[in-house]
Amino acid sequence: MKNLQKRNNRGGLRRRKTILLVLEIFMIIAALVFIYPVVFVFINAFKIGSEITTNPIGFPSKVTLENFHRVLTVSGDGITFFRALLNTFVVAAISVTGIILISSMAAWALVRNVGALSGFLFFFFAFFLVIPFQVIMVPLVVLATDMSSMSLFGLVLMYLGLGAPTGVFFYHGFIKGVPATLEESASIDGAGPFRTFFQVVFPLLTSITVTVGILDLIWVWNDFLLPFIILKKGTLVLFQFSNFTGTFSTDYGGQTASLVLTATPVVILFLSMQKYYIKGIAAGAVKG
Amino acid sequence: MVINKTKKWTTFAVFVTPALALYIIFAIIPLFMGTWLSTTNWDGVSPWVPVQIPIDVFENEILPDLTSSQREFLLGFYLRDDGQGTYRKQETGGRNLRGLRKYRAMAAFSSAGYVNDNFHFVGLTNYRSVFSSESDPAFWPRKVRVNRFKTGDPLSKAAAIPIEEFEDYFLVRIRDSEDKAFIESLYKKDGDFYLLDSGRFPRKGQKFAIAGELIELEDVGDFWEPFLDAVEEAGLEGDSPDIAAIARSTIPAVREGTIGSESMEALERGARELFDAARLKRVLNENWFVESRRMGVLLFTVFFSFFNVLLVNLSALLIALALDQKIKTKNILRSVFFIPNVLSMIVVAFIWQLVFSHVFPILTGMDRWLSNPDVAPVLTVVVATWQGMGYYMIIYLAGLQNVPQDILESAAIDGAGGFRRFSKIILPMLVPAFTIALFLSISGSLKTFDIIFALYPSTTRNMGVENLTINIYRNAFVDRQAGMANAKAILLMLAIGLVTGLQLRATKNKEVEL
């Protein structure tokens, strides 16, 4: 009886293995088809001139970096692509550092001071999730003009304000699970609140900090509409693609190369940090 | 103790204030301002404080109602200009009426009861006119006519017309019986086409070919040009031609009777050809068209959101179920399926523009993809689904982690088949994941902007793929209707709240049942 069940199981196991193998092959093919558009652009970025029109699907007849060279040196609206890339990087880096700083501080204060005010403020931050950007779009332009901050600096301030609620949300959920004993002993030893926070608490938050950092870096790097209405055209890298689209002819080599240059940083960031990024989405999903 | 408590609150304030202040300045104040703007007639560019005010209005109606400090403040910026008969806003010496000063000036004007034509309260007018078709016909489903033969097209474009096209989209539409007989006499059915009788147009109705023949005629001289122009115009306008009369009025030799009979024949022959060609062009232009439906802003927003939510969740769930099996490459596959989600929507749109224009024609043999208004709405959904799917896949994968393996195994031992295990165990355990995935995908789809905006730069309207967010952007920054744009944005916010609220209630109920 036992033997029979065992043999049955073994037969079932083999069948299961075959099914899994078929599934795996199918999924690999599906993934290849799925990612093909990205691969297509990547391959075409290394083709000479307009080879994309004569030979769109195949490999380059001769691999060239000439497109990348042209893209990095070309200047649209008085700003070079390289400069725009740098601008984007600086805006993203400062904004994300700022968001991490202000939202972790706020979340810590909210968690550690239990009370009606803290509860209200947390919901007040969470309220942000229901405001579509279109509602605040025109007022932001008015406000930015009023404050004379139609600039990269103004943009950074806006990212701080618009990124803080989600940051607070993430940190709030995490800090709730961190025991307060360490902080209490630190403050008994005479450490002030700033020292307690930055030397004792903040190091404990590293994993959520990395998550928030990646989520916000990718958000700021990829954000289009806010800089589009606040800044001069061409300032950030996402505005630069139009340099290669003429009225009568398109520089496909330049376009594909610029796409590759813009997307590579986020893809590398994602691939190297995907554990944290995916954890962030899952955590946000579970708490939301 | 009291000191300690004060200190505690100071610390609290110091830690919370930076985030709170920036959030209030850049999200909450704009929210209130947006609500306020939605009740004004602002166009988005006109200054909120008037540039100039007639002298008598300023001196007799505004100044007397102000406090002395307000009066002094306004007179610091408005200077009397007797030449123009107005008080003009002067912004000199680095002092300008911007920022807080602008609001102070507005407060002063409103306390005097002065109404700025370019910026004043209009109540709910914007909200009411959002739904009236007069304010924006593109908001509602509509028919548009696409001419197959445009004015200026060469006749070669109509040399061969597929039978179906000819009969259903051209011949039936010709009302004028003479025109109809004319067309029927010109086209002969041949195979799958109606062919233009080339014998009638030996030179394909080209004006310069006829002109070339007339230039040779000495007694016509240089006068063929106004003659041919007049003939062509008659054909285009649909007048029946009195070629002799036209010749008489434009060519002296005809008027004086000194023209040779051969030349007169050549004139008439050329004129007949040219007239027929012009007439054919006119009839083609007027009657050969297809009527194409455009969804309009409202319906397209619903269409896009519905199918995007459906496809994104369905594909994400299927892929998550597959990757949840014990397959070796699942981590790599997960990364691959997620990559589009970390790309900027602008990058995604450009990638697909290239794919649609260079790869799809080779694969399908069909040339027009993005520029074909019949498939444009579908393409936006395809691209948005491709980009968004990975995010929801992660949510479902996280949800599948919560499905207890031991229950699945014991169910399998008890003889429950794959489908039963899926519907009775896995699906119910996934309801929390459904709740959040639906919430995020519904609100995300309704808020989609970048991807459609970049796929169709400046042609969203013609292609019938203008959704509400793009319509709002357009109202605000192109159509100069900022008040209207904000009214639509507020309505969008309420709609998102309503739809997601209903959805959360429905799915949360399912969660409770478990």
Image (tube, coloured by chain):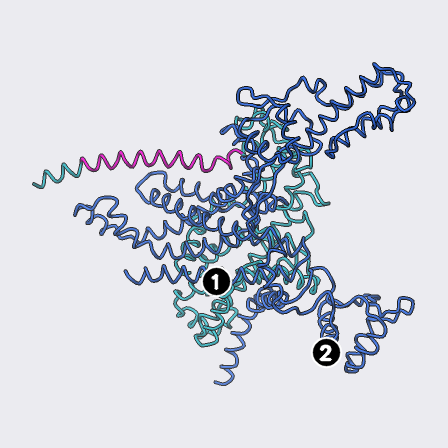
Residue at x 33%, y 38% (from the top left corner): B328
Q: Give the overall secondary structure of the magenta segment.
A: helix
Indicate the quadrant containing the C terminus of chain A: top left, top right, bottom left or bottom right.
bottom left
Q: What stretch is highlighted in magenta?
A: A11-40
Q: Residue B111 carries which label?
A: 2
Q: What element carries label 2?
A: helix
Q: Is mark 1 on a helix, strand or loop?
A: helix
Residue A14 falls within the magenta-colored stretch: yes
Which shade of the palette goes to chain A? cyan
Q: Does mark 1 fall on the same chain as mark 2?
A: yes
Earlier residue among tags 2 and 1: 2
| Mark 1 surroundings within 10 Å by alpha-carbon count, few (fewer than 14), some (14 through 19), many (20 or more) | some
Pick the front one: B87 or B400: B87
Pick the front one: B259 or B235: B259
Q: Position of residue A178 (x, y in %)?
A: 40, 65
Please tell me whether residue A35 is drawn above or below residue B224 in the rendered image. below
Q: Position of residue B104 (x, y in %)?
A: 72, 74
Left or right of B463 on screen, residue A27: left
Q: Identify the residue position indicated by label 1 in the image.
A: B497
Left or right of B315 on screen, residue B174: right
Separation of marks 2 and 1 at Cα, in angstroms: 37 Å
As shown in the figure, which amino acid type bears the numbered disc 2?
A: Ser
Which shade of the palette goes to chain B? blue
For residue B509, what is the image quadrant?
bottom left
